[in-house]
Image (tube, helix red, strand yellow):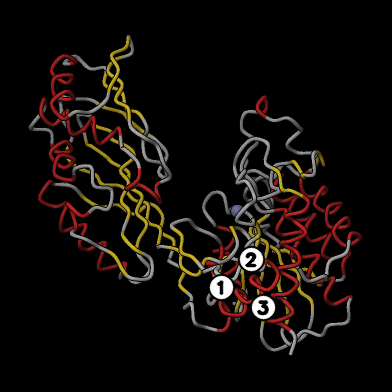
């Protein structure tokens, strides 16, 4: 391992991280100049204060959508795209420590945001500073961009891109090492079609998860039961109705799950053959790549389309399904949407956009990916390490020529968005050494 980071540097970084963790920066009601709530605004101000103390030039968007901190000289900008918001603590009883107080315990740093993304943000901020303190001169300006609603709708970065200069290359330290060079396009949308007076359903789940269970408590339970038996679908008969069981996984891995909602829909289609939404689901089937509807859609870089249907609402007025698609990076977005519109039209359904994130794709054989990978291998000794692809989403996709790089090691247990989120002190140190090596290789002639 290389040796750019001393105990003192890491300890100072941990102290600063404590200041960030103390800000409960999850999305709340908007306040003046705090579009995502005062918690996030205070975290934005705090990170800029820390940067300022380290000698960075800082700027905050007066409306509170984003901020940035710069250091060094050069015509080109190397960006570090971070975020200061977190998901809420969730079930506080499940935490062993106060989620909003950094607690060092059993060799690890506990607190909401230690992994995602306050820990990596502070680690990179201090690593850049450490290299400059060691006398290095960078050939590019370094800019940390602090986004504010990464966990929700990315409006902070949209505002940044509207008002500020882009970067020439960059990383988002908000995932796992070694590196993600392709992230599928992410489209969330609705399919809206005819209502029914025969059947009322109101099954709603998160966009980004495959429904793990679905309940039918209508009048025709014995017929639905027969249909479930016929299809061989698991279910339980309870006082609350028939509960169909599936296997919930993240929507980006939808083909690996079992969608309970689709199973219920397929069984209901036998009992209510004239309901348009059920007719659609019957034809769609259980294939979460959307192939039954659209044909096979895939590319060599990022694999197959995933297509998750996570809600089904039917009433007298309309029926509505929400879908989450992870789109291969080389698929043309407009053409795909047109194809969907065409294919749902025979069922009298219409397509409605909810949210779209463009894909990320930086070729593997370019300088940025090669340099980052060589740096990673030098520090870790993992000769066989390969850059990867993801159906998930980081801020890397909001900027050109940017990839997700760290900060979790492949051996770091994943606690993002979970109770007892923590980052082992030793893993943080290794991550900082990887970043130091990478920044030296990218930024010093
Ligand atoms: Zn994150």
**Residue projecting furthest to the right:** 8
Q: What residue is shown with label 3?
A: 78
Q: In the image, 198: left or right of 234?
A: left
Residue 81: mark in rendering: 2
Q: Quadrant of residue 30?
A: top right
Question: Which of the two residues, 445 or 239, is positioned nearer the viewer here?
Answer: 445
Element type at mark 1: strand
| Residue 16 image point, x, y percent | 84, 54
Q: In the image, 183: left or right of 204?
A: right
- Give the residue displayed 10% in from the left and 29% down from the top: 270
Element type at mark 2: strand
For the residue with label 3, is its CB less than 8 Å from the closest atom of ligand 1? no
- Give the residue displayed 74% in from the left and 79% down from the top: 440
Question: Which of the two residues, 136 or 149, is positioned nearer the viewer here?
Answer: 136
**Residue projecting furthest to the top:** 239
Q: What residue is shown with label 1?
A: 402
- Give the residue displayed 81% in from the left and 38% down from the top: 105
- CB contact under 8 Å: marks 3 and 2: no
**Residue projecting furthest to the left:** 274
| Residue 381 image point, x, y percent | 66, 68
For the C terminus, give its image quadrant.
bottom right
- Give the residue displayed 47% in from the left and 56% down from the top: 392
């Amino acid at each position: 391992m290389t040796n750019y980071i001393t105990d003192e540097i890491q300890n100072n970084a941990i102290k600063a991280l404590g200041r960030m963790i103390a800000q409960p920066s999850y999305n709340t009601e908007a306040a003046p100049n705090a579009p995502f709530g005062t918690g996030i605004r205070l975290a934005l101000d705090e990170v800029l204060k820390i940067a300022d103390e380290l000698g960075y030039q800082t700027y905050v968007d007066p409306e509170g959508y984003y901020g940035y901190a710069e250091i060094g000289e050069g015509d080109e900008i190397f960006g570090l795209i971070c975020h200061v918001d977190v998901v809420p603590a969730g079930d506080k009883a499940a935490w062993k420590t106060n989620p909003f107080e950094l607690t060092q315990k059993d060799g690890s740093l506990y607190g909401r945001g230690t992994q995602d993304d306050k820990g990596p943000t502070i680690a990179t901020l201090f690593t850049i500073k450490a290299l400059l303190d060691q006398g290095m001169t960078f050939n590019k300006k370094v800019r940390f961009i602090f986004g504010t609603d990464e966990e929700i709708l990315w409006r902070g970065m949209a505002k940044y891109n509207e008002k500020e200069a882009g970067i020439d290359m960059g990383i988002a330290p908000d995932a796992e090492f070694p590196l993600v060079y392709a992230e599928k396009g992410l489209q969330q949308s609705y399919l809206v079609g005819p209502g029914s007076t025969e059947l009322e359903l109101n099954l709603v789940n998160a966009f980004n998860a495959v429904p793990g269970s679905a309940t039918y408590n209508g009048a025709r339970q014995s017929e639905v039961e027969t249909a479930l038996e016929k299809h061989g679908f698991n279910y339980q008969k309870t006082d609350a109705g028939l509960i169909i069981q599936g296997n919930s996984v993240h929507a980006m891995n939808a083909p690996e799950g079992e969608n309970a909602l689709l199973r219920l829909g397929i069984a209901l289609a036998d009992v209510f053959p004239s309901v348009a939404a059920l007719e659609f689901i019957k034809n769609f089937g259980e294939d979460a790549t959307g192939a039954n509807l659209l044909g096979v859609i895939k590319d060599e870089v990022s694999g197959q389309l995933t297509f998750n249907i996570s809600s089904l609402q039917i009433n007298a007025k309309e029926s509505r399904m929400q879908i989450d698609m992870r789109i291969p990076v080389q698929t043309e977005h407009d053409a795909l949407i047109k194809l969907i519109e065409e294919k749902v039209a025979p069922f009298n359904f219409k397509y409605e956009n909810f949210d779209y994130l463009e894909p990320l794709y930086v070729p593997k054989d370019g300088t940025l990916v090669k340099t980052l990978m060589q740096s990673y291998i030098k520090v870790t000794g993992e000769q066989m390490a390969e850059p990867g692809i993801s159906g998930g989403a980081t801020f890397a996709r909001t900027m050109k020529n940017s990839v997700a790089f760290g900060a979790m090691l492949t051996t770091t247990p994943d606690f993002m968005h979970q109770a007892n989120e923590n980052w082992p002190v030793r893993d943080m140190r290794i991550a900082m050494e990887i970043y130091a090596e990478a920044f030296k290789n990218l930024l010093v002639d």
